[in-house]
Amino acid sequence: MTRSFTAILRAAATLWRTSSPLTAVAVVMLVAFVPFVVGMFVDPRTITGVPAWLKPAKFAISTAIYSLTLAWVFGSLPTWRRMRALVGWTTAIVFVIEVAIIAVQAWRGTTSHFNVSTVLDGVLFGVMGTLIVVQTAASAAVAVALWRERRFDDRAMGWAMRLGMTLTIVGASTGGLMTRPTAAQLEQARATHAMTVSGAHTVGAPDGGAGLPGTRYQVA
């Protein structure tokens, strides 16, 4: 038990030296994850059919994992100090603002993504979208550094990181498809002369279908 705890502390210290912003934001998200989970059990409200605090909890844990993984990747890029600092701070700031907005919207009892029903909701959604574009662009800098780096102790791991980071950027770039209004939303906007929702979590199928266990993300 003592050895495991010591190993965790050493790993945390290494990640902190590699990127203190990413390590710090991961700790913040892990701490925030706890009250979000508690909220799922003590707050009876639901948003789009799921517990109001499920989404903040999912984003808190996912951003923590991403932050720690990116800090670990930085360990293989020792000569790219400026890039690590810029991307580390950019990612940390974006994640804090993103999860904060998601949590505020959950507290308000409304959706965060695709919500354009009021000026405030539209602005918050716009801020989130803009920040994610910035973060994706910043992560592209990491991919460039990985492809240009030639000093990997483990060549297989080097290729895994290059391809993994590239796949991450490609996957994130497809998120723009989710913000396009669906046919049903456009039809409703024509009928009511107002649009309250623009986009959906599912592309090519209606939202609300069967999802993955735990996260309830749709497979489609």
Image (cartoon, grey):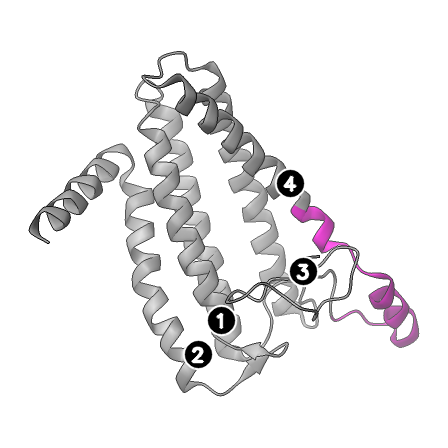
Give the residue drawn at x 86%, y 67%: 184
Within the image, what quadrant is residue 100 found in? bottom left
Magenta range:
175-196
Q: Residue furthest left?
A: 2
Where is residue 114 shown, x and y percent of the image?
67, 63
At mark 4, the secondary structure is: helix
Type of the residue with mark 2: Met
Mark before the other along the chain sequence, 1 or 3: 1
Residue contact at pointers 1 and 2, CB within 8 angstroms: yes
Q: Which residue is under mark 2? A: 40
Taking the image as shown, residue 193 lies to the left or right of residue 42, namely right
First reached walking from the N terminus: tag 1 or tag 2:
2
Residue 70 sits above or below residue 60 on the image:
above
User: Could you say which disc has been placed on residue 173 in the image?
Assistant: 4
Q: Give the x, y percent position of residue 30.
A: 32, 59
| Above or below, 204 relative to 196 | above
Between the residue at mark 2 and the residue at mark 4, the CA separation in whole angstroms equals: 30 Å
Residue under pointer 3:
201
Main SS of residues in magenta: helix
The mark that comes first in sequence, 2 or 4, is 2
Residue 104, image x, y percentages: 48, 71
Q: Position of residue 126 (x, y in %)?
A: 63, 56
Residue 54 is marked as 1
Q: Amino acid at mark 4?
A: Ser
